[in-house]
Image (cartoon, helix red, strand yellow):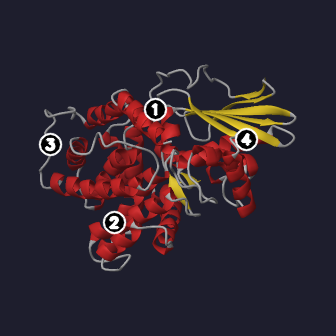
Amino acid sequence: MHELTELIRQDMKPALGVTEPGAIAFAVATARRHTKGAVRGVELQLNSGMFKNAFTCGIPGSDEVGNAHAAALGAVGADPEKGLECLDGITPEQALRAKAMVKAGQIKVEMSEITSRIFIKATVKTNEGEASAEIQDAHTNIVRITENSRTVYEKPGQTGGVAGGETNAVPLIHHYTLEELHTYARTVPVEELLFIRQAFEMNLALCQAGLDSPKTTYARYLLAENGGRVISDDEQKTASLLCNAAIEARVLGLPEPAMSITGSGAHGIIATMPLYAAYKVQGYSEEKLLRAAALSYLICMYIKEYSGKLSAFCGCAIAAGTGMACGLVFLRDGTTEMMTHTINNMASSITGMICDGGNQGCAMKGVVAVDAAYRSAAMAMQSVYIYSVHGINGSTPKQTMRNMGRIASPGMVETEKTIIDILAEKE
């Protein structure tokens, strides 16, 4: 199997609700499993991106939102064996217990530091002791577990520090050029890509949940704009509907999972659903759809490895949107040069869009991403693009994508701090 195929396979994961509340609940549930007795309280330390993304985010199994409620649900009922779907199966009684814990002040949440690197430390205290679980760099990457201050598990090769030591290792994806990624998407045996079908199936079910729910507003508006049809003959309106009904369902905490990429359900949705719309409206083959989706995923991952997993930069729109835009070029039989120009158009237009947490605003950002991707691809295929001499565009696609990532980290560290300050004022 090609190493890029395996890279996608390992990165694609189901996630129930927004990934950050799921990761928080997973960390707390893991710590809880290493304790005995009745829970007296939970202490939670989060990096800035984790703190921000879950701040007002809907949570599956609950009518509440935010970090503290995700932690409380992790303590009373989440199943760590389910990973990012750990909140699947929460009962109304457990949701009430979690709400009571938050109201009683039993959940303490603090931010550890401003960084794009994922960090969670969850400590569960009971009447018989305490245990902690620590996550670094990826949403379910448990690196340390302690019981009563005694380390009972430590992942080999972990570095110390709140968010772990920086690494100079070059990510696998960065060993490839855009042309090589394009060649892979064209030539990899399609049998290797059949697993990507799961992403479309899962994200379509989430989209339908959004269309069916009385909680959503963007989904209903976009459906009306599409003539009341889920699939119309307007490719771009269909793409925006399929993409953003799913995103809105996710951020509101509806009980259907998304297929995530780079640790984010919204990234996975934007990277795939507009391509599915194009496939349905234009009648492309399923094989071509799977190849386009693989390319979309890889370009999203390429940018995210530069920007960091969580930052003040909307990777959903910028990274996944850019990947999806290149996927559109692929579906339309475009060249690598056209994809290069598409990346330039995306880099020079929506780079810098902020991430102010997982919330209903993600649907609006998704609308903008779809619009930008369709414009960027169509213009690039007509040789209308931002030249490399301008702005943050580089002399190669690799350099442009690296520069996009640099805008996020270290470029937007102060932006992240300002967003956190604004959220703190709302508490």
Residue 284 x %, y %: 33, 69
Name the residue that disc number 2 marks.
239
Q: Which mark is residue 78?
A: none
Contact between marks 3 and 4 (CB within 8 A): the answer is no
Depth check, mark 2 against mark 4: the one in front is: 4
Residue 381 x %, y %: 17, 55
Depth check, mark 1 against mark 2: the one in front is: 1
Q: Which mark is residue 30?
A: 4
Above or below for 180 versus 197: above
Q: Earlier in the sequence, mark 3 or mark 2?
A: 2
Contact between marks 1 and 3 (CB within 8 A): the answer is no
User: How far apart are the two marked residues, 3 and 4, measured between alpha carbons?
Assistant: 48 Å
Depth check, mark 3 against mark 4: the one in front is: 4
Name the residue that disc number 1 marks.
116
Name the residue that disc number 3 marks.
386
273 displayed left or right of 66: left
| Tag 1: amino acid | Ser
> In the rendered image, is residue 209 in sight?
yes
Q: Earlier in the sequence, mark 3 or mark 4?
A: 4
Asked whether 13 or 150 is in front, the reply is 150
* Number of residue marks: 4
Give neighbour class at mark 1: few <14, some 14-19, many 20+ (Cα, 10 Å): many
| Tag 3: amino acid | Ile
Q: Quadrant of residue 42?
A: top right
> In the rendered image, is residue 311 in sight?
no
Residue 235 x %, y %: 28, 70
| Tag 4: amino acid | Thr
* Residue drawn at 44 percent across, 27 percent down: 170
* Residue drawn at 37 percent across, 36 percent down: 176
Secondary element type, mark 4: helix
Above or below for 210 versus 67: below
